[in-house]
Amino acid sequence: MVSISIVYQGDLHCSAVHGPSSTRLETDAPVDNQGRGESFSPTDLVATALGTCIATTMGIVSKKHGWVIDGARVAVQKHMTPPPRRIARLNVRIEMPAAFDAAARAELEQTAHGCPVRISLLPAIEVPIEFVWPA
């Protein structure tokens, strides 16, 4: 279990503290939803969680096999619905830093699609994942 403590600071701004590390992060509502957009919004954190989860789980698999994926880049584009607001789609693009054989590529792609955040998202959220492999 991990505990995260959140304080609503007013004006659509929150501060959260990660219990195990005491790391702090701030959130703010986006400009298109009455906020100032001065930090990640809560739904931005969902997109961030997805991208970092994909990178982390691929890193775990790579470490197990001795593959090097340092420098891999993951970009996530979040698309919201009109009110009532919800995340409609999270487009993911993964640029791999090195070529791998077909079996390794398949395992890394399967890992991305099966990361804990991805499989925790509702089916109503589209999550297309595109891999870009060097020639």
Image (cartoon, helix red, strand yellow):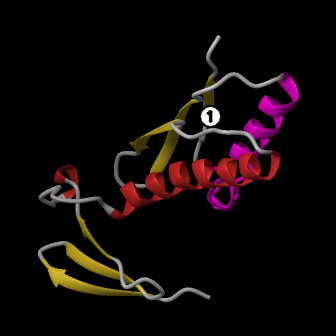
**For the point 42% across and 43% down, which residue is it?**
78
Residue position marked by numbered label 1 in the rendering: 129
Residue at the farthest top position: 135
Q: Quadrant of the C terminus?
A: top right
Residue at the farthest right position: 103
Q: Quadrant of the N terminus?
A: bottom right
What's under tag 1, amino acid-wise? Answer: Ile
Residue 82 against residue 73 in the figure, above or below: below
**For the point 61% across and 16% down, which residue is it?**
134
Where residue 120 sits: x, y (%)?
66, 62
* Residue 107 highlighted magenta (yes or no): yes
Start-end of magenta stretch: 102-124
Residue 134 against residue 34 in the figure, above or below: above
Residue 94 against residue 35 in the figure, above or below: above
Which quadrant of the structure image shows residue 41? bottom left
Where residue 113 sits: x, y (%)?
71, 44
Where residue 21 sits: x, y (%)?
43, 83
- Secondary structure beneath label 1: strand
